[in-house]
Amino acid sequence: MVIHKNLYQIVPFDPNIRRGEDIDYLINSKMFGFNFFLDNKLSIKHLPPKETHPMWKRIREDIYRFVYEKAKIDSQYELSNMRMVSAKDFFPYPGEFLTNELEDKIFKTNLLLAWNI
Amino acid sequence: MKISLGIITKHFNTLEPVDEFLNNASKYNHKIYSVIIVYSHSCDFRLVENLKEKVKIFLIKINNAPQIKQQLIKIGVSQESINILLDCPSLKKYGVVPYGLNRNYVVIQALLTGSEGLFFVDTDVYPKVLVKEGDEVKGKEINFFGQHFWK
């Protein structure tokens, strides 16, 4: 993630975000009128460490963050120096997880986990 | 432009991948103004000394950054805002730090020390891509900073 001081002197990271802070930062930035660009031509070698937490725990963390981010979007109100954003502004990702279908996605994901599919 | 590299980690106990990114910048003639390392648990200070020979280093421990707080107060940030942005009760209680708060340490240090651009790199990434040559898959070095910033 690369950010210019014009952005980070106005928009901080949300200190309550436990994971997915970079994606959350895109939402915050857009609220303050900054567009973020995801360049699919950029590459990097990623060697993640072995996962130490079970799948359900990682999914739970994702559920927490999407619920939190959806609430952030749903609870916006008009402010002079900010713009209102919607889930559609962030399609396909993370927008798909910020709509009213989130609860249904969580329910179905948990069913699949329970069935161990 | 003053470009800084921002790293957040639990334990700063290896030069990888900071060293690789610094060498990569040097190889492709990009000047790195500083490296901002924010750690929460432990730090091998010999490594920091080693890095200081190459580049300006700012080393910050979560919940132990009185200089940053003093500077923020000096420029008019309220104590309440400082607490929201930087205080991490979960570190003491559970040994964990929310990533958002972690990155704020980097951002604020960058602001206070005059950085103009910030590259966040995770501790498990390298300035390389995987390419297939014949039957072999190799890591090929790329102009990491150039590709991201100087297009």
Image (cartoon, rainbow, N blue to C red):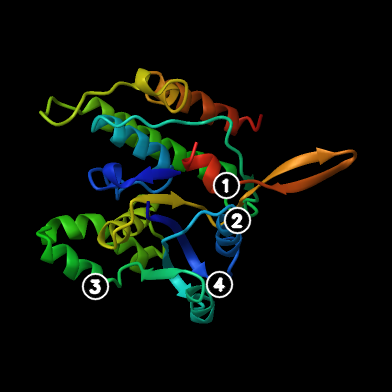
Q: Which residue is depicted at the point 46% across and 28% down? A: A106
Res. A26 image quadrant:
top left
Whichever of labels 1 and 3 marks the residue nearer the N terminus, that label is 3
Q: Residues within 10 Å of mark 3 (few under 14, many from 20)?
A: few
What is the chain identity of the residue bearing mark 2?
Answer: B
Q: How crowded is mark 4: few (under 14 residues within 10 Å), some or many (20 or more)?
A: some
Mark number, residue B13: 4
Q: Do the residues labelled 1 and 2 touch (CB within 8 Å)?
A: yes
Q: Which residue is depicted at the point 37% across and 70% down? A: B61
Q: Which amino acid does label 4 sit on?
A: Asn
Q: Which residue is depicted at the point 25% across and 30% down? A: A31
Residue A24 location in percent, x, y?
A: 36, 38
Whichever of labels 1 and 2 marks the residue nearer the N terminus, that label is 2
Q: Do labels 1 and 2 share a chain?
A: yes
Res. A3 image quadrant:
top left
In this view of the protein, which residue sits in the foreground, A104 or B87? B87
Q: Are marks 3 and 2 on the same chain?
A: yes
Q: Name the residue under label 2.
A: B24
> Marks 4 and 1: which is nearer the front?
1
Q: How far is the residue under mark 1 from the one under mark 3? A: 32 Å
Q: How far is the residue under mark 4 from the one under mark 3? A: 23 Å
Determine the secondary structure under disc 4: loop
Q: Mark 1 points at which residue?
A: B144
